[in-house]
Amino acid sequence: MEKNEKIHTFYVLECSDSSYYAGYTNDLTKRVKVHNEGKGAKYTRAKRPVVCIYHETFDTKSEALQAEYAFKQLSRKQKTHYMGGPKNDEISEIDGV
């Protein structure tokens, strides 16, 4: 990869309260670090530490943002399945999702 090329990444974090946070970045390692320093999204500041549990890379920023948007439209059960997890996770059953 050339120096000017960026890796466009859609990622999912699991927060300390087991909720999911989805986002876009071009530097995943740095972005997760920023979230855990409390300097990332407002949502994750009170839910630290966060762990990256899923990511996908794309050729363009637009494709990564489209994946993020589509993911955010899913129910928790569908999100878990999308990431390769079981179709019925414990939290989904508790939440009735």
Image (tube, rainbow, N blue to C red):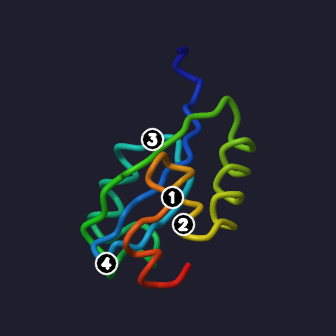
Q: In this view, does 74 lie to the left or right of 7?
A: right
Residue 58 image point, x, y percent: 63, 33
Task: Name the residue that disc number 3 marks.
Answer: 27
Whether 66 is drawn above or below 13: the answer is: above
Measured Cα–Cα span from mark 1 to mark 3 = 30 Å
| Residue drawn where x is 73% and y is 41% of the image | 63
| Residue sitting at x 47%, y 84% | 95
Q: Are marks 1 and 3 in contact (CB under 8 Å)?
A: no
Crowd tier of the residue under label 1, counting other residues whose Cα lies within 10 Å: few below 14, some 14–19, many 20 or above: some
For label 1, the residue is 87
Say few, some or many: other residues with alpha carbon within 10 Å of mark 3 (under 14 / 14 to 19 / 20 or more). Answer: few
In this rendered view, identify the residue nearer to me: 34 or 73: 73
| Mark toward the viewer: 2 or 1 | 1
Give me the disc on residue 17.
4
Of residues 79 and 67, the one nearer the viewer is 79
Give the label, 4 or 2, closer to the camera: 2
